Image (cartoon, rainbow, N blue to C red):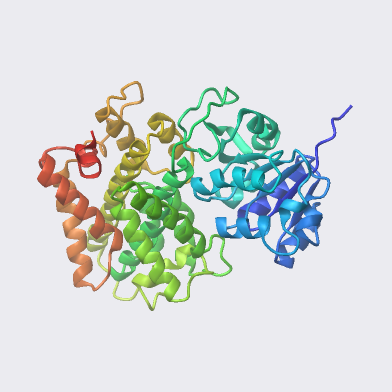
Amino acid sequence: MTKTRPEVGFVGLGAMGFGMATHLVKEGYPVTAFDVSPQPLQKFKDAGGKAATSLAASAKGKSFYVCMVASAQQLEALLFEGSKPLIEALERDVTFLVASTVPAQYVQHLEGAFADRGRSDIFVVDCPVSGGAKRAAEGTLSIMAGGTKAAVEKAMPLLTTMSDTDKLFLPGGLGAGSNLKMVSERFGMVRSADHGLPCRQVHQVLAAIQILATSEAMAFASWLKLDLEAVRQKVISSPAYSWMFENRSPRIVSGQFSPAPSALTIILKDNGIVTEAARLHGFPVPLSSAAEQAYLTGLLQGYGTEDDAGMVRIYCPDFVAPKSQPSEAPSQQDAEERTQLVVDLLEIVHLVAASEAICFAKRLELDLKQFVRLVNDAAGATRAFKEVGPSILETFGITDIDSGDGEIANTSLEDCVTRLNKVVHTARDLTCPLYLATAALGVLTATKQMAGPELGVPSTFTYYLGNMM
């Protein structure tokens, strides 16, 4: 006899939320969803789900409730504000899954806010997700779940349904929602933790940088009069590879930025959580800060609701996706040399971004081995991170991991500075701004002065951690 699945309430049918909700439906869960926009509700109904006409209706009779709204502000408003707040409709002993990316401090606040309103019966699970709309629809997300042992155990059926094998991380207590302080076996014991920024948000250090780096590199290629599709293929097969580049670059080549698979406002929000936490902890994040300023520029230019791949336009205001070879195309030899500049830009930015993220994770006392594993399995993966990550960990005395002994990990500071100087000089002559490349060059130059030019890129930890070692 087939076991009846419990009923699930769901709010937030954006790109990822829609995929998550429809996947639960495909897996046999009766899901009732609500969204302020009627279009995704109708699509969800067409996909076999139930469309609620109100928040209260989406929660009535549900033993699980999944929240996938865009921000902590939205979550706070729907839970506690208005004439019919969600908290009044949630069933007794409901398991409440916060899948949105919100600050750890906010999730920690929720449990107390529920108790203050007489709802200490609610089981809260902090479970931010990563992987994009496609993986959401396939049920292969990376999920980083934190909460009390009882809450996580109750949520486990939904968490395992929505996540990929070996991509469900159980880092600790509420608010640790992916801080990876303590992860045992995939279904192992969850220990309490009270550390700051969720690992999902440290992961967003990489995601935010790499999304912008894709636009920065492709804009630079456009200024260099290169064939963008040829550049794209070269980068994907080079040490400059990143999942974000492979995912975003076809959208740049097509020039189609609306409707938005991933809106600029979303990555700006995530980036802002990172920089705010960095300021709180007194930690330098020059690449993340440069990315935030660039995203704010895009927002001011009216691109907020459009695809984040459209950030290419802040570098090339008149950017139009090429339909053929650019006019005045360079010779084959010149094209190869110019393409190498684009590859150098991305590779070196990714190297410095890896150091920034790992050092921030160390500052926050995250489990670094688990953090590296998470990144390599998620959207923040780059070829540079996979190689240099283990080498940076070795400098912290973590040696029981695969060694990053490849060509990238052995790149010297002198070589990186020389190559990136050439990139920045060329871009300046073209009047092409490079937010990330110049920030990375500053980190490398400072590290070269502190540690010596002959050392490798892993030594950039001295810039970020200084005397904290």
> Residue sitting at 83 percent across and 45 percent down?
61
Question: How far across and down, in percent of the image, does residue 308 sit?
Answer: 47, 63
Q: Name, please, the residue furthest toward the right.
A: 1
Whether residue 341 is visible: no
Residue 31: image location, x then y, percent: 78, 48
Task: Determine which quarter of the picture holds residue 2.
Answer: top right
Q: Quadrant of residue 142?
A: top right
* Residue 36 versus residue 4 in the image, above or below: below
Rendered residue at 70%/66% (across/down): 37
Residue 119 versus residue 309 in the image, above or below: above
Return the residue nearer the eye: 216 or 239.
Answer: 216
From the top left corner, tell me how far across and down residue 246 is, in percent.
45, 52
- Left or right: 292 as drawn, with respect to 16: left
Q: If the image is split into quadrants, where does the N terminus sit?
A: top right
Question: Is 190 on the left or on the right of 386, as rendered?
Answer: right
**Residue at 19% across / 49% down in the picture?**
444
Where does the C terminus fall, quadrant-wise?
top left
Picture layout, residue 84 above or below residue 459: below
Exactly how many numbered labels are in the figure?
Answer: 0
Q: Is residue 442 left or right of residue 394?
A: left
Nearest to the observer: residue 327 or residue 465: 465
Q: Residue at x 43, y 45 (%)?
A: 203
Residue 18 appears left or right of 457? right
- Of 48 and 76, the residue lying toward us: 76
Q: Would residue 293 be seen by someone viewing this image from the given angle?
A: yes
Q: Nearer the viewer, residue 210 or 411?
A: 210
Percent across and percent down for residue 93 are 75, 38
Residue 369 appears in which quarter of the rendering?
top left
